Amino acid sequence: MKRIILFLIVLFAQQIVLAQAPMSVVNKTAAIPFETVENQPIFPGGNNEFIKFIGKNFRVPDVEDFSGGVLKVSFVIEVNGSIADVKIINDLGHGTADEIKRVLSLCPKWTPGDQNGKPARVLFTLPVTIRN
C-alpha cells in the first residue's frame, strides 16, 4: 500500500514538473506594458501634435453608407519610442482598422515613458472620432 501511495505521489509530482515551461522558452526581456507610469511617453510636440498628426494622415473611407463613429485602437509605446502591438478594439468597417494601423506605422518615435527611473513599455488606448 505504501508503494502505491509513493508511486502516485511521484507520478503527480512528475506531472507538475513536466508541465512547466522551460526557462529558455520564457521571454525575460518583454515586460508587460504599464497603463500608468510616473512619466508618460510623449509624442514629438505633445498630445496636440499627435492629434494633428492623426487628423492629417488618416484618410476617411470614401464610401456612401459610411456614417462615421468612434474607432478605438490600443498600442504599446516601446522603450525605444516605437509603436508596437497595435490592436483594434472597435472597428467601424470600410477599412478604418487598416487605415489607423497605417497611420500609426508612420508615427515618429516617441520619448518613451519611465517607471522608477527605468524606461517602460506603456499601453495606450486611443479613441479616434471619424466624421464623414
Image (tube, rainbow, N blue to C red):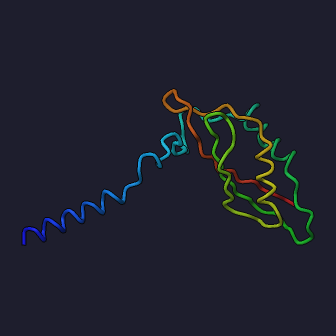
115 or 81, which is in the foreground? Answer: 81
Relative placement, left or right, of 60 versus 78 is right
Residue 129 vertical placement versus 24 (above, below) = below
Place of residue 60 in the rendered image (x, y in percent of width and height, measured from the top left): 87, 57
Place of residue 67 in the rendered image (x, y in percent of width and height, measured from the top left): 85, 67
Relative placement, left or right, of 127 versus 103 is left
Residue 21 vertical placement versus 38 (above, below) = below
Assign the N terminus to one quadrant of the image.
Answer: bottom left
**Residue that lies at the very extreme toward the left in this rendered image:** 1
For the point 42% across and 46% down, the residue is 23
Place of residue 28 in the rendered image (x, y in percent of width and height, measured from the top left): 48, 41
For the point 23% across and 65% down, the residue is 11
84 or 123, which is in the foreground? Answer: 84
Residue 110 vertical placement versus 103 (above, below) = above
Relative placement, left or right, of 14 versus 94 is left
Question: Which quadrant holds residue 110?
Answer: top right
